Amino acid sequence: MNIETKQVNSITIMKLGETNRLYALNANIAKEKMNEFLSQPKSRLIVDFEEISFIDSSGFGALLSALKTSKEHKSFIKLCNINKDVMELIELMQLDSIFDILQDQTACINSFSSVE
């Protein structure tokens, strides 16, 4: 899995790419990278799902691990650019009530100003 990161102000934006899947073969890589950022207290991470059209239980496990890490270290994670099929799964599993999900990177960046 190719994971691109960039900094905007003090926010890290992580874009999952190379494959359109977040699944058993690459979820651990994504989990490690997300947890690396989120283990730094008060860090702010946006995970961009623009390239992702499929996610399995391993992918959801990686996201839940990242959420747990963010809570333990008082950091923040937001998700954006989630396609319709993946969003349907997130809603079915009722994960939309525990994750902060916004339309795009700009909305995520702007929403962090209310966190500060």
Image (tube, rainbow, N blue to C red):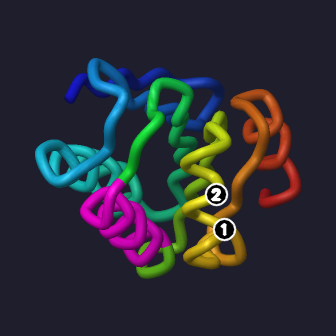
Q: Which residue is mark 1?
A: 91
Mark 2 and mark 1 residues within 8 Å of each other at the beta carbon:
yes
Q: Position of residue 19 (x, y in %)?
A: 28, 24
Quadrant in the picture for the C terminus: bottom right
Q: In front: 69, or 19?
A: 19
Give the structural element (helix, strand or loop) at label 1: helix
Q: Residue at x 51, y 41 (%)?
A: 47
Q: Residue at x 40, y 62 (%)?
A: 63
Which residue type does callout 1 highlight? Glu
- For residue 105, which numbered disc appears in the image? none
Q: Tell me the quarter of the picture where residue 4 sits.
A: top left
Is 59 contained in the magenta span?
yes
Q: Position of residue 106 (x, y in %)?
A: 78, 28
Q: Which residues are magenta?
A: 56-70
Give the structural element (helix, strand or loop) at label 2: helix
- For residue 88, which numbered disc appears in the image? 2
Quadrant in the picture for the N terminus: top left
Which residue type does callout 2 highlight? Glu
Residue found at the very far left of the displayed protein: 25
The rendered magenta stretch, by its main secondary structure, is classed as helix
Residue 10 lies, with reference to residue 50, above or below; the image says below
Is 57 contained in the magenta span?
yes
For label 2, the crowd category at 10 Å Cα-Cα, with few meaning under 14, some 14 to 19 and many 20 or more, is few
Number of disc labels:
2
* 111 left or right of 79 in image: right
